[in-house]
Image: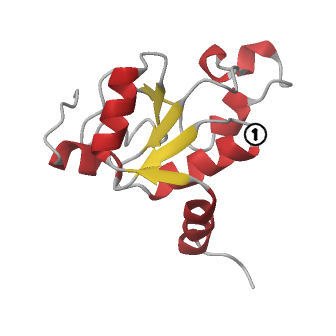
Amino acid sequence: MAKTFKDMVTEARDNVKGISSQEAREKINSNPNTLVIDVQDAADAGACGLIPSSVNISLGMLPIRADQLVPENLRDEKLQDRTRPVIVTCGAGGQAALGAYVLKQMGFEDVAFIEGGTSAWKEAGFDVER
């Protein structure tokens, strides 16, 4: 039977750590090397705001940008260190879980996603950029 988006998100959530907005903020503040990635498509990114210092890499491009074997011009240098802490977000959390799972499968050692995405971050009263 074919998987649905919901099925894929459930599988991702079963395999990658989801953290609260508060936990994400503490991790970002305690380690400035933490990379925050918003995996929404560029046209949608920022609709609810962007977490300060986050980078936008769409879910579709994430595995390419993180791949160490594709041509250098396709890679993102911020995604070449598999030990760098990474927190993935999106608007509501589903795409973030998928993105975090992709990175985990690619060998990232310290990857998590924000439960509820940037919407939850904003609802917690934390700053966002437009």
Above-or-below relation of 90 to 36: below
Question: Disc 1 marks which amino acid?
Answer: Met
Q: Position of residue 75 (x, y in %)?
A: 71, 20
Above-or-below relation of 108 to 74: below
Q: Position of residue 94 (x, y in %)?
A: 46, 59
Rendered-image quadrant of the N terminus: bottom right
Above-or-below relation of 60 to 52: below
Which one is in front, 70 or 35?
35
| Residue at the far left in the pictured view | 125
- The picture quadrant where one finds residue 129 is top left
Which one is in front, 60 or 129?
129
Task: Tell me if 46 is positioned left or right of 127 in this view.
Answer: right
Residue at disc 1, secondary structure: loop
Mark 1 crowd level (few <14, some 14–19, many ≥20, 10 Å Cα): some
Q: Image point 40% across, 39% down: which residue? A: 43
Rendered-image quadrant of the C terminus: top left
Which one is in front, 75 or 33?
33
